[in-house]
Amino acid sequence: MASLARISSRLSRRIPLARAIQTSADTTQLAQDASHSEPFTVKLHEDSFRAYRTEIPGLEVQVTKDGLLSMYKEMNSMRRMEMASDALYKQKLIRGFCHLAIGQEAVSVGLERGITPEDRVITAYRCHPFAVLRGGTIKGVIAELLGRQAGMSHGKGGSMHIFTPSFFGGNGIVGAQVPVGAGIAFAQKYMEKPVATYAMYGDGASNQGQVFEAFNMAKLWDLPVVFVCENNKYGMGTSAERSSSNPEYFTRGDKIPGIQANGMDIIAVKKAVEHTREWVLSGKGPIILEFVTYRYGGHSSTQDPIRGLQRYIEEWGLATEEELKKLDKEAKAEVDQAVEEAKASPIPFEHDLWTDIYYNGYRAPIHCVGVSVKRFTTI
Ligand SMILES: Cc1ncc(C[n+]2csc(CCOP(=O)(O)OP(=O)(O)O)c2C)c(N)n1
Ligand SMILES: [Mg+2]
């Protein structure tokens, strides 16, 4: 009798794979001369986006030299931060969990470039870049991973538990952040704030019941939420084709429309984010945004989001290889300094045991014997 694994691999061969969605430096065209100070237009490859129950975003995008160079620098900083974390983990200075987003920098940096500081973001455990970009610091993230007082959660949370006022974590329970994200969007709508919420999840999380429950409520109430599926093609070691009966994640919202975007091209990412933000804020209800991306580094140069942007910048004559190397060096130096400062930070203080437990004004009466009430502070 054929084993289940053999049957499922035969079945998956019969299911047509998603058409490759791709934009690389040799296909995205300069639509007009690149002025070095003024915005100029580029045309994304026609396969940058696919759509379900809606139109794809426009392919013409306005960019600036400064914007592209600063995105390049920021992606390098995020990569260097994750590489430094990897090294610290291997030295056993970081203990516990440490999920890195190497290879997915175009998604985090591109998302941030398409939203405003007031918009809300929530994600799963692969959260370090979002924590920095949403108002944190590299030192704050590294110190948190090292369990030090200077960490963004004062060394008490670790890798998956990092927050800022507009970034709701960092969540270790796969998929659980999706209904929480719908709740955040509900709060914004209830308070009549013109704010979009980006609720992120992976291809592995996408099959959970709570994800579909959140989709249903969000559509029922037309909440201003963008459900972002970071499809890095694997959940742990299982490929998307083996875990999902429909690996076209942007089509899985039933009545909720969806966009699929090339998550390896930061220009396409930013454009898709701006498009979906406009969608949810115009009162049309939720939308799904799937980024096709890759997990970890070590891919060929065309699959690397940083090398992809480097090719655009060089081919459009915006900066030389040497100038870009200098930016990368600056990113490395920034991370090296953050690592040293984080290492120099002490472990959490004893009184930190009693902080960050209750939200201000919601503190429960204290009945513990021997605890100084004075030290019992709230966030
Ligand atoms: C409810 C729950 N089930 C299982 C796990 C263990 N787990 C951690 S990561 C992961 C895979 C998730 O894959 P995906 O959503 O694709 O995210 P990726 O790691 O690829 O970014 C699983 C099953 C968990 N943390 N929580
Ligand atoms: Mg995955």
Image: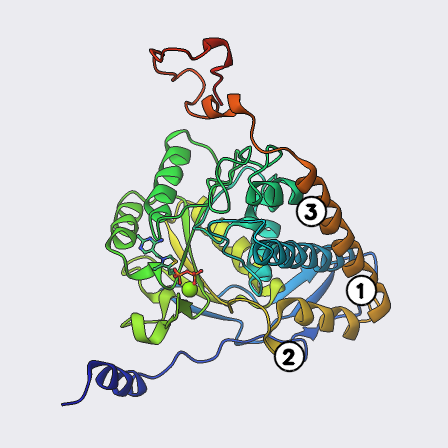
Residue sitting at the far left: 1
Quarter of the rendering occupied by the N terminus: bottom left
Q: Is residue 199 left or right of residue 5?
A: right
* Depth check, front residue: 303 or 67: 303
* Depth check, front residue: 258 or 124: 124
Percent across and percent down for residue 132 are: 61, 45
Q: Is residue 250 visible?
A: yes
- Residue at figure coordinates x 47%, y 46% from the top left: 160
Callout 3 touching callout 2 (CB < 8 Å): no
Amino acid type, callout 3: Val
Q: Is residue 35 visible?
A: no
- Residue at figure coordinates x 54%, y 72% from the top left: 48
Q: Which residue is mark 2?
A: 27
What is the CA distance from the residue labelled 3 to the residue labelled 1?
23 Å
Point out the frontmost of discs 3 and 1. 3
The disc at residue 129 is none
Secondary structure state at the residue bearing disc 1 = helix
Label 1 CB-ligand 1 distance < 8 A: no
Amino acid type, callout 1: Leu
Q: Which residue is mark 1?
A: 324
Point out the frontmost of discs 2 and 1. 1
Amino acid type, callout 2: Thr
Callout 3 touching callout 1 (CB < 8 Å): no
Residue 360: name its quadrant.
Answer: top left
Question: Nearer the N terminus, badge 2 or badge 1?
Answer: 2
Q: Which residue is mark 3?
A: 339
Are there few (<14), some (14-19), or many (20+) residues within 10 Å of tag 1?
some
Percent across and percent down for residue 93 are: 59, 49
Q: Is residue 293 left or right of residue 85?
A: left
What is the CA distance from the residue labelled 3 to the residue labelled 2?
38 Å
305 above or below 10? above
* Depth check, front residue: 50 or 297: 297
